Image: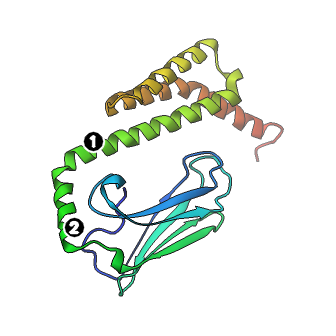
Amino acid sequence: MDVLIPRNSKIPFKVARQYTTQKDGQGSMRISVFQGERDLVADNRKLAEFNLKGIPGMPAGFPKVEVSFLINADGILTVRAKELRSGAEQSIEVKPQYGLTDAEVERMLLESITHAVDDIKTRALTEARTEGELLLGQTEKFIARNASLLTQEEMLRTAEAMQSLQLSLTLDDKDLIQRQIEALNEISRPYAERAMDQAVSGALKGKSLQ
């Protein structure tokens, strides 16, 4: 959970943050709005949810989706999601009666303090796993397109590193996952650079520099 509007913010209040897609060709994104003090959405209260559709089919990480929150003087929250490249946009209003009571806010605040350390660890582990899954997918696609650029030794080392990373994702060890991510990145860096050099060379072939 990302906190965009801190507790006790003065109204009217407006804030925005950019997000992107996780999968190649992803055409929609679910925007979920929660209220609470915890790092994980499961420990907070859902207020609203909507889907942003019409995101152009692009590689993961390319779309730029700006999610903005606006609370007006009447306490009505408007959440808007807009894909900046295409202009695709969707919004929703959340009425103030869907908020939490003072007692519920106090309870959630106390829980956030009590579970702060565990929440941070859980969030860090989740983020590491997400990063590892993305890297595995990107590496697999890169090799499928550029297998001819890799030596047999690089193919074997990459396969071993991918297997080790995949295994680490099943364990509750953030540091291990990060080490396996770094190991795979280190192995793939040389041939990724060769692919980049080849692409640049191909683009410049037949052209003279002025």
**SS of the residue under disc 2:** helix
What count of labels does the image hold? 2
Callouts 2 and 1 close, C-beta under 8 Å: no
Quarter of the image with the N terminus in it = bottom left
Q: Mark 2: which amino acid?
A: Glu
Q: Nearer the viewer, mark 2 or mark 1?
A: 2
Can you tell which mark lies on residue 104? 2
Amino acid type shown at disc 1: Lys
**Nearer-N-terminus badge (2/1):** 2
- Badge 1 is on which residue? 121
Residue 196 sits in which quadrant? top right
Residue ID at (34%, 79%): 97
The residue lying toward the viewer, choosing from 30 and 61, is 30
Rendered location of residue 130, percent (x, y): 45, 40
Callout 2 crowding tier (Cα within 10 Å): few <14, some 14–19, many ≥20: few
Callout 1 crowding tier (Cα within 10 Å): few <14, some 14–19, many ≥20: some
Residue shown at the point (58%, 31%) measured from the top left: 139
From this view, report whether residue 86 is shown above or below residue 149.
Answer: below
Q: Residue 44: horizontal and vertical position, in percent?
A: 31, 59
- Measure the alpha-carbon separation of dots 2 and 1: 24 Å
